[in-house]
Amino acid sequence: MIDACSSLDLWLRYRLPEHRERVVEEYWYVCRRAARRFVRPGLERADLEQIAGIGLVKAADRYDAGQTTPFEAYAWLLAMGELMHYVRDNERLMRAPRRVQDLDRRWSVAERELAPLLGREPLETEIAARVNATPADRNEIRAYRASRTIASLELVPAARTRFSCEALDGVLDRICVEGVLASLTPLERKIVRSIHLEETPMSVLAKRLGYSRRHLTRLHRRALDRLRNAAPRAVAADEVAGTPRNVIPTEDR
């Protein structure tokens, strides 16, 4: 870390191209970690790393030594922003077949109709039976809905805006949560967003959704368990180790 800090200090002091190249090289692990979160069919990790590298270069050019936010965290945020732009713009070009879109609409209607009839959130198998969906159809619905779930770019402040470590923590937390919400059911997503993003008290949310507080607590716990299972291993390792959100672990250097 001493060498990396020295390179960063030299770049901030003299702004020579060779110093920036060293900063980019020594902090490239940030790009590797960020790219891993977006790898999927059609999106190669090597390409994603190059996109994240654009954010790393921007971070080096725009970073102010007077900021309280560590450079690693600032670079991470800009790299994630570039990746989200790239994935969003590319996925706009990928239109699902009309049959899948129609199935998705019927699936949503069935979800809304079954919930009051059953008095609880319907299971995937129950929804599938109502719309006569085959196992292959269920897989297509999961893939289609996952492809539409991209963290909103509104979560990322303007790149030139200066912000505190606390504000950055909130942004990174929201990005991490939004990035894996596709693995949850609609009700679980609503619970997680309400509690962790909107900071809605449990008692208020239980009343709003028409559940007892005890039942809502069980649903919340189940949603968190599913999030832990769906989250990338890197995120899980950070959580267990208690690594602060505004510091990117360095094991991938």
Image (cartoon, grey):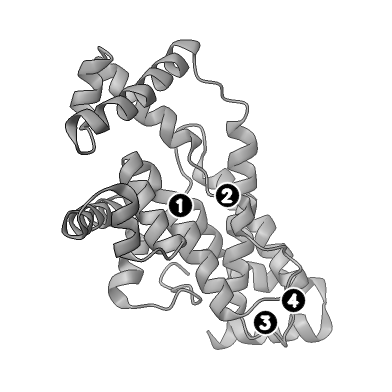
The quadrant where residue 140 appears: top left
Say whether marks 2 and 1 touch (CB < 8 Å). Answer: yes
| Viewer-closest of 197 and 21 | 197
Disc 3 or 1, which lies upstream in sequence?
3
- Viewer-nearest of labels 3 and 1? 1
Q: Residues within 10 Å of mark 1 (few under 14, many from 20)?
A: some
- Viewer-nearest of labels 1 and 4? 1
Residue 251, percent from left and from top: 40, 71
Count every numbered label the image shows and give the total: 4
Q: Residues within 10 Å of mark 2 (few under 14, many from 20)?
A: some
Q: Amino acid type of disc 1? A: Glu
Q: Relative to 217, say whether 210 is above or below.
A: above
Q: Residues within 10 Å of mark 4 (few under 14, many from 20)?
A: some
Q: Disc 1 designates what residue?
A: 178
Say whether marks 3 and 4 touch (CB < 8 Å). Answer: yes
SS for tag 1?
helix
Q: CA distance from mark 3 to mark 1?
A: 34 Å
Q: Residues within 10 Å of mark 3 (few under 14, many from 20)?
A: many
Say whether marks 3 and 2 touch (CB < 8 Å). Answer: no
Q: Disc 3 designates what residue?
A: 7
Disc ID at residue 100: none
Q: Amino acid type of disc 3? A: Ser
Determine if residue 33 is in view.
Answer: no
Q: Disc 2 designates what residue?
A: 152
Determine whether, in the image, residue 128 is placed left or right of residue 198.
left
Q: Disc 4 designates what residue?
A: 19
Q: Amino acid type of disc 4? A: His
Disc 1 or 4, which lies upstream in sequence?
4
